[in-house]
Amino acid sequence: MDQSALIRDITAAALARYGNFEKPDFHFVGPELKASPWRSILQQLEGLGAHITEDTDPNDDVSLNILIEKGAEALSLQLSLIGPYAALRRITSGRPIEAIAALNDSRTDLERRVMDIVSRGAKLLDRSTLLFPIKFNLSNMEPDETTIYNVLFTDGPSGL
């Protein structure tokens, strides 16, 4: 799927969840988190032998946020409550967070295994898609600075 088609799909899914982009309705977040739509992926991740920590803030996030640590490796995984979209990022010291969206982006066995598990149930988004601008009214962001990342995952900066 090309990026413009993907952006259209994401925009349609976001509009269906939020109602509109000027005065978005976030009431779906609590019930969606309780429904645990990503339960299958979480169970599979637990089988990796890594330390898995859930770090979702229901006041700011519209995604399930997972920290995956194994040895010196640390990955951030966000699973959107808007639709079947995910952001997988490598956390390294002294460097910006790096998005991992394709097999050729992965460097380690853990990254490849996480990608395999996640890609069976969600579309991993690349950096250019995550940073694609979209007009959306969030309390912690200026509408002109809002990106697909903010609409799908959280109202804070992406760190990319």
Image (spheres, helix red, strand yellow):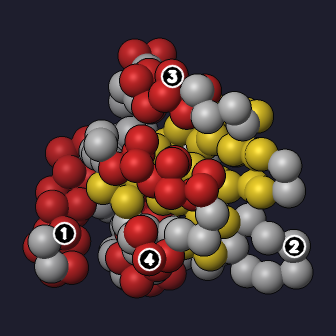
| Residue 121 found in image quarter | top left
Give the Cα separation between the discs numbered 4 and 3: 25 Å
Q: Mark 4 touching mark 3, by CB under 8 A?
A: no
What residue does disc 3 label?
43
What residue does disc 1 label?
6
Q: Mark 1 touching mark 3, by CB under 8 A?
A: no
Give the Cα separation between the discs numbered 2 and 1: 31 Å
| Residue 101 found in image quarter | bottom left
Q: Secondary structure at mark 1?
A: helix
Q: Nearer the viewer, mark 1 or mark 3?
A: 3
Q: Secondary structure at mark 3?
A: helix
Residue 65 visible, this orientation: yes
Mark 2 or mark 3, which is nearer the start of the sequence?
3
- Indicate left or right for 9 with 29 as reference: left
Mark 3 or mark 1, which is nearer the start of the sequence?
1
Mark 4 or mark 2, which is nearer the start of the sequence?
2
Amino acid on which the number 4 mark rests in the picture? Asn
Q: Secondary structure at mark 4?
A: helix
Give the Cα separation between the discs numbered 1 and 3: 27 Å
What residue does disc 4 label?
104
Give the Cα separation between the discs numbered 1 and 4: 20 Å
Residue 43 x, y percent position in the rendering: 51, 22
